[in-house]
Amino acid sequence: MGSLQDAIKKLQIKPGDRIKLKERDAHDKCGFDDQVRTEAETAIMAQEIDQLQDRLYAEGTRSLLIVLQGMDTAGKDGTIRGVFNTAGPVGVSVTAFKQPTENELAHDFLWRAHAACPRRGTVGIFNRSHYEDVLIAKVKSLAPKEAIEKRYDQVNDFERMLMENGTTILKFMLHISKKEQAERLQERLDNPKKHWKFNPGDLDDRKLWNEFEDAYETMLHRCSTKWAPWHVIPGDHKWVRNAAIASIVRATLEDMNPRYPAVSWKPSDFKIV
Amino acid sequence: MGSLQDAIKKLQIKPGDRIKLKERDAHDKCGFDDQVRTEAETAIMAQEIDQLQDRLYAEGTRSLLIVLQGMDTAGKDGTIRGVFNTAGPVGVSVTAFKQPTENELAHDFLWRAHAACPRRGTVGIFNRSHYEDVLIAKVKSLAPKEAIEKRYDQVNDFERMLMENGTTILKFMLHISKKEQAERLQERLDNPKKHWKFNPGDLDDRKLWNEFEDAYETMLHRCSTKWAPWHVIPGDHKWVRNAAIASIVRATLEDMNPRYPAVSWKPSDFKIV
């Protein structure tokens, strides 16, 4: 297990580090070698996450925010299913950030993210997030360059404020190879049940692969902080991706060590009639 | 299976019916006789609900709203876990209605319920709901009598509007016996891990058991409509409760018959490079 923990630790981007996505292997197995066994272990970790989440809910004073980013087809929904379905919707809420509405655009870019932050006692998952405002916004020049440049620090300050107020933050970039994306997009064309997932606009984004990679690299460099670290998760193998993320989430919740709250009464104070 | 379906159909309150909760057996098994087998069938139904939910999500035009009400310890969280954890938090959101905040009280009683209604394509679950405003509000005189009297029709109109705009509504009253509640409250006193769930105020509500029953009976009489039926679910056996609700939810989603949407393109229109 030692080498596995090391492999997982390496997925975290240290503050200030500059990485090149092309130099990281999206096909890497992070030390998980047997698929069947790893999937069984992930199922157990999902149960442990459920139990830890129950304690977090009981404690009711802190929350966990999970940010998922990645190119189209990177597997954001699949990650949520694989890692969080066992904990279920009572204590886990998911917010999918789509193209901003007129009302959202009428506010600063962090406004809608802030509104979606998890209640104390719960886990909140952002499927895409405020980081779109330094990713697609940058690649497609949806905001002035100087405004985007300021956003990295604004995001860091925002996330530090959340952390200081009881929210632990984990950020995962689901890293797939361009070849794997081609296969997943082709599958959406080939399988009629997946047609609805295919958006012709995704092909335009695919043409901008290098530009998106640049934007991701800047984001990872500027916004992986001590209080809200980014992890780059090899995503070509879905089972590796789920196992790695489940490991990190479980370890984080174990570190948080939520406790059932003490009560101000003794059981013998009450008689139920 | 015929008699099972009949038993389940009987759980629905017909519009205008007046029932007496004391005459209904909270311990009833609704024709589910073997616990192990029933739990296995419930797990399969939960998977079918997941698949139907996926089609609802793909279709993206309609939603399902599930309202859960019941006395303290009736099993609202447990129902959500048993029936909806397999579908998971991507397409299922839960809203727990607690004591209204100052801001909520500054609006009409339906305001916060409306804001929490599910997005198209998703299932929304209300853990308690706008019905608290004709239950606890009535029992504890939290609003003038005449105002509460008007709420039944206001709720019906609101729910019809939701239905006419694409939301299917299912309402479940989790019906436990007073004896079963005593056992569950005692378990919260006896098990230190459940102490946090014990609220001394629950004993005050327990003293008002008959008054709450009256309020429930009026609610069931006035607000079980063709477009948003109430079901009274025997709740003393958790496995019966979950099986009955899973059956009704699955049958409802099957009737809705969500479809993967047609697309305006042919797969051969695209070449992924």
Image: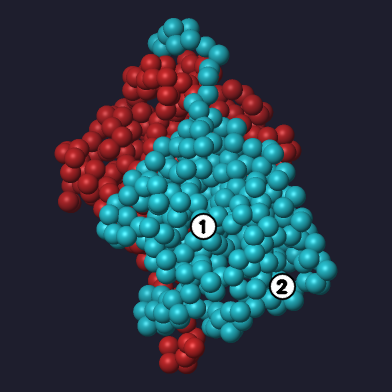
Chain colours: A cyan, B red
Q: Residue at x 41, y 59 (%)?
A: A30
Q: Quadrant of the C terminus of chain A?
A: top left
Is A248 drawn above or below residue B138 in the view shown? Answer: below
Q: Is B192 on the left-hand or right-hand side of A67? A: left
- Secondary structure at numbered mark 2: helix
Q: Is residue B197 in sight in this rendering? A: yes
Q: Is residue B66 left or right of residue B48?
A: right
Inspect the image, locate mark 2, and give the three-letter code of the amino acid beneath it: Lys
Q: Chain of mark 2?
A: A
- Kind of residue at badge 1: Leu
* Circle 2 residue: A138
> Foreground: B74 or A38?
A38
Observer-side mark, 1 or 2, equals 1
Q: Position of residue A23 (x, y in %)?
A: 53, 72
Residue drawn 51% across the image and 37% down it? A255
**Disc 1 packing (10 Å; few <14; some 14–19; many ≥20):** many
Decide which of B191, B240 is in the foreground and name it.
B191
Where residue A11 is drawn, which disc sits there? 1
Q: Work out how far the residue at label 1 is from the one at label 2, CA to CA, in angstroms.
A: 25 Å
Q: Residue at x 80, y 72 (%)?
A: A145
Out of A138 and B248, give the one closest to the viewer: A138
- State the image quarter where residue A20 is shown: bottom right
| Mark 1 vs 2, N-terminal side | 1
Disc marking residue B226: none
Local SS, label 1: loop
Rendered location of residue B253, percent (x, y): 37, 59
Which x, y percent locates residue A234?
Answer: 46, 64
